Image (cartoon, helix red, strand yellow):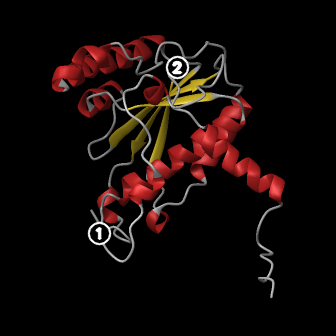
Amino acid sequence: MNPKANNNAYKQADIDTVYRVIAERRDMRHFCGGEVPHDTLMKLLGAAHLAPSVGLMQPWRFIRIQDPELRNALYNTVQEERIKTAHALNEREDEFMRLKVEGVKDCAELIVVALMDQREKHIFGRRTLPQMDLASASCAIQNLWLAARAEGLGMGWVSLFDPEQVMQLLNMPSGSLPIAILCLGPVAEFYPRPMLETEQWAKRQALEELIMQDGWQD
């Protein structure tokens, strides 16, 4: 007997496109200036805002950076943390410093994603797992990333920064938290593989090694 047809599924061509954009998404560090049309930017942020959030708390806040001096200050903050991270990596310090880890000065749009303040009042789904606010905002970033790839735009997530410094630069309220500096814009081409894999910094693990059944398995 044939299995019952799944009437909720998309057409195969649409399904293939969804899997394609997931597979071809890249953490981009090389940008070629240009611009992101306002309508496109709002579409991308709209896609981010459609992300699921625990208790529908919608903890994400998007801060668009347009002041050149502020962009430069954020760049300096990233570079400070880059050096500190390199020192912490000990024997891999020189190897790390050769990597391009951001495109803050080169991208068309720079967006800081932050968690809102006063999140403690949202306990639906967070009483025992308060970090679900971060998980929810991460889903919003992934939505934006996939939508950007579909639009032919590159995006990179920069996490090398001191949150306190960024909060001060952006006059953020106590209780809020910056979690990402997003570089967004046109790129000459997308990496065929994740850049850190190409640079032999790390490699993707086999899926079979990460799947367990009925409990934790070493």
Tell me the kind of residue under disc 2: Gln
Q: From this view, report whether residue 164 is shown above or below residue 1.
A: above
- 40 shown above or below 32: below
Residue 36 image label: none
For image coordinates 40% across by 56% down, the residue present is 209
Tags 2 and 1 in contact by the CB under 8 Å rule?
no
Mark 2 lies on residue = 66
Label 2 crowd (10 A; few <14 / some 14-19 / many >=20): few
Residue 1 falls in image quadrant? bottom right
Task: Give how far apart the Cα atoms at labels 2 and 1 are.
Answer: 47 Å
Is residue 44 among what the camera can see? no
Mark 2 secondary-structure assignment: loop
Q: Is residue 160 left or right of residue 88?
A: right
Report crowding for label 1: few under 14, some 14 to 19, many 20 or more residues within 10 A (C-alpha). few
Q: Secondary structure at mark 1?
A: loop
Which quadrant of the structure image shows residue 163?
Answer: top left
Q: Is residue 61 above or below residue 87?
A: below
Number of numbered markers: 2
Q: Which residue is mark 1?
A: 216
Image quarter hosting the C terminus: bottom left
Q: Which residue is at the front of the view, 42 or 160?
A: 160
Instruction: Give me the residue at 65% from left, 20% from top.
Output: 189
> Relative to 46, is 162 on the left or the right?
left
- Give the x, y percent position of residue 115: 38, 46
Q: Nearer the viewer, mark 2 or mark 1?
A: 1
